[in-house]
Image (tube, rainbow, N blue to C red):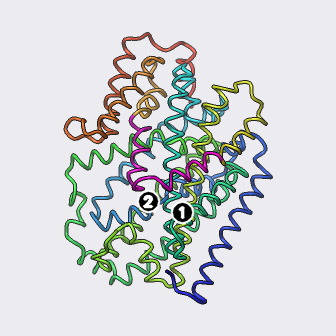
Amino acid sequence: MVGAGQFQLAAIIMTLVYIIFIMVLGYIVGKREAKDVENFYVGGRRIGTLILFFTLIATIIGAASTVGYTAWFWIRGFSQLWFTIGAIIGYLIYVIYMNPRIWKFGKKTGAFTITDFLEYRYQSRLIRYIAGLLIAFAYAAITAFQFMAMGKVLHTIFGIPYEWGVVISAIIVIVYTSFGGFWSVAMTDLIQGILTFIGVIVLFCVAVATAGGFGNILASVPPKHLSLFGYVTPVQALAWILVFLLGIMSWPDLWQRVYSGKDLRTVNRSWIAYVISILAFTLLVGFIGLAGRVLYPNIEDPETLFPTMAMDLLGLGGVFVLLCLYAIIMGTADSCLLVSVMHFVRDIYQYLFRPKASDKEILKASRIGVIVVGVLVLVLALVAPSIFDLWVMSADITGATLAFIILFGWRWKRGDKYAGLASILLGFIGWALGYLGYSPWGLDPIIFGGILSLIALIVVGYLRPPVPKEIQSLIDELWRK
């Protein structure tokens, strides 16, 4: 347990002030802005560069990018960078290839989601239902992962039972997200994104200095830690790149942020700044992990390295850094919860059961959905297996099944609903076989699923006629400058 007396009191006050501030901010912004479904889900398509940049930061940098990356750099050093390389390639594909199409499609059709595009492009309501459920359940699992990580942070700061920390964290996120949807998420992400960099930079500076500076760190860690191929073969490195690359193509929170930008220039500027920041953040967290290797060479659980270093090296300042970590994870939790609800409500409730529902009814259902899904996710968080496995499994499903029908859908004038359905089905089968240990050559499940998905899309696409002329016209229109 963290020390008693003034230290403990200061920690409690800092945390309570932050929590109250975030909830009040979420309520005020939500009451003022989230008055219809478009504002609730994509901020009325009028989000500016600064807020869009920080909501990208706060959404994507979560528990895996902080606690996880610190641990993984402690374990395997610069070999961990292959994950980041895969992610950056994926983000650049968005900037160059996908973002202009996503934004134009949203403006033209009023789309909010990936599934809006998939139904329109493949002319299949069934594809919407399947993809919507896959995304909704995957993002519910990712939200659970964030709740679990937040519970660990509160346990570290206050010494309260882990389960209490999970429950408290879930309630906070559920309440302010239900107030204002994307507006509450975006405005709180602005604060959380700023705190993200402050906390990580503070710990980075202190950790590197305490470990004797860069020279001593590089001289003290195992030599294999300093090589990109120290712990992986070139084939494994390529596999890691593909895992993240395929997964990122189908991340609906990224699409949501493209839809929300007030214009394409805003979207591109925020994304380019985001890509640069991701690389910088990875290096900061990576050197925290390497410094931890020098300072804590025998730590039992590397996943506790980040909070352990914060509390040991910074004293009360460590509480501030952990509070920043809490904010980082909260920024991912609220976004993933909103995405999960968006797909349950829009793809299932609205399109399957209430196709004639008014905007007011969908807005009410969305707010109720945040509460219902949030509570179910809380239960999942309390009974789920290891947090890393949970995150990887959920991200893999959408990458294996949806990545190629998205990538090809923007440009290829073949591939109708039957090709799309075959691609999803074979992708899921390949993913499942991979997790059961039946993928050839030991391929990662997402890669095996992705290969089968691609083959099915191309084969069935060429066996079927080209897509209708109106879809071909849409593709041409989205590629015009």
The answer to whether the residues at label 1 and label 2 have Cβ atoms under 8 Å apart is yes
Please indicate, yes or no, whether residue 476 appears anywhere in the rendered image.
Answer: no
Residue at image coords 40%, 26%:
425
Q: Nearer the viewer, residue 381 or 75?
A: 381
Q: Nearer the viewer, residue 244 or 364?
A: 364
Q: Position of residue 181 (x, y in %)?
A: 68, 48
Residue 285 horizontal side relative to residue 14, left or right: left
Alpha carbon separation for disc pair 1 and 2:
9 Å
Q: Quadrant of residue 36?
A: top right
Image mark for residue 328? 1
Q: Nearer the viewer, residue 78 or 314?
A: 314
Q: Quadrant of residue 189?
A: bottom right
The residue most toward the bottom is: 5
Residue at image coords 65%, 29%:
108
Vertical order, 393 against 221 (above or below): above
Q: Earlier in the sequence, mark 1 or mark 2?
A: 2
> Which segment did they paint magenta?
372-400
Q: Position of residue 462 (x, y in %)?
A: 37, 14
Give the prevailing secondary structure in the magenta stretch. helix
* SS at badge 1: helix
Residue bearing the label numbered 2: 65
Residue 26 horizontal side relative to residue 243, left or right: right
